[in-house]
């Protein structure tokens, strides 16, 4: 009987080891850094900084390179983000309109306060 149980114990241990290996391999895939994403984001940020500093040609070339790297890595995600850009622009426009209204109201309140202080000093 003991000889028959040894292969079953070995098979059981092999199954447990294989399952443990699969779980570790899956966790490595999830935790593995995506170097191409990091490069794409870094290059895009560099392009934006160059554009902000006024170096249009270098900034545009760098941003295009970052977009190309991102497109190679995740084409579906880039397409989805591209389709969302008009919504982001609309949200940004609405935010700027609200901010403009707030600044205008703040300026009006400042003018009123200045008028009251001028009257109080007279």
Image (cartoon, rainbow, N blue to C red):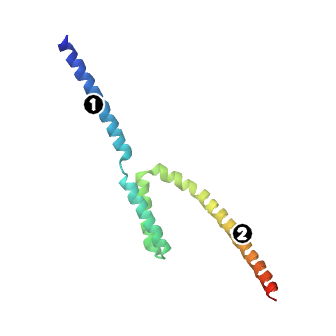
Tell me the SS state at disc 2. helix
Q: Residues within 10 Å of mark 1 (few under 14, many from 20)?
A: few
For the image shown, how many numbered marks are present on the structure?
A: 2
Q: Which residue reaches farthest left?
A: 3
Looking at the rendering, in which quadrant would you find the C terminus? Answer: bottom right
Q: Is residue 109 visible?
A: yes
Residue drawn at (36%, 43%), measured in percent from left and top? 29
Q: Which mark is residue 42?
A: none
What residue is at 72 percent from the left and 76 percent from the top?
107
Estimate how packed mark 2 is, as few (under 14), some (14 to 19) or many (20 or more) residues with alpha carbons within 10 Å.
few
Q: Residue furthest bottom?
A: 122
Relative to 7, residue 78 above or below: below
Which residue is disc 2 drawn over?
101
Q: Position of residue 33 (x, y in %)?
A: 36, 51
Rounded to the nearest angstrom, the CA distance separating label 1 from label 2 is 66 Å
Residue 120 place in picture, x, y as percent: 81, 84
Q: Is residue 26 above or below residue 57?
A: above
Q: Can residue 65 be seen by looking at this rendering?
A: no
Residue 39 appears left or right of 12? right
Q: Is residue 118 left or right of residue 90?
A: right
Expressed as whole percent of the image width and height from the top left, the position of residue 78 reads 48, 53
Residue at the farthest front position: 121
* Among the two numbered marks 1 and 2 on one chain, the one whose residue lies closer to the N terminus: 1
Q: Which type of secondary structure does the marked residue at label 1 adopt?
A: helix
Which numbered dot is residue 17? 1
In-front residue for pair 14/73: 14
Q: Nearer the viewer, residue 9 or 59?
A: 9
Residue furthest top in the image: 1
Q: Which of 37/62 is in front? A: 37
Residue at the spot 27% in from the left edge and 23% down from the top edge:
12
Query: Left or right of 53: which side holds 30?
Result: left
Q: Quadrant of the N terminus?
A: top left
């Amino acid at each position: 009987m003991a000889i028959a149980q040894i292969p079953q114990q070995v098979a059981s241990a092999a199954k447990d080891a294989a399952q443990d290996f699969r779980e570790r391999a899956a966790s490595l895939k999830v935790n593995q850094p995506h170097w191409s994403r990091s490069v794409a984001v870094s290059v895009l940020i560099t392009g934006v900084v160059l554009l902000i500093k006024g170096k249009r040609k270098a900034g545009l070339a760098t941003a295009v390179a970052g977009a190309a790297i991102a497109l190679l890595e995740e084409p579906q995600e880039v397409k989805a983000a591209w389709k969302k850009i008009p919504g982001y622009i609309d949200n940004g426009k609405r935010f700027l309109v609200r901010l403009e209204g707030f600044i205008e109201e703040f300026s009006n309140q400042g003018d009123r306060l200045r008028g009251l202080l001028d009257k109080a000093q007279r």
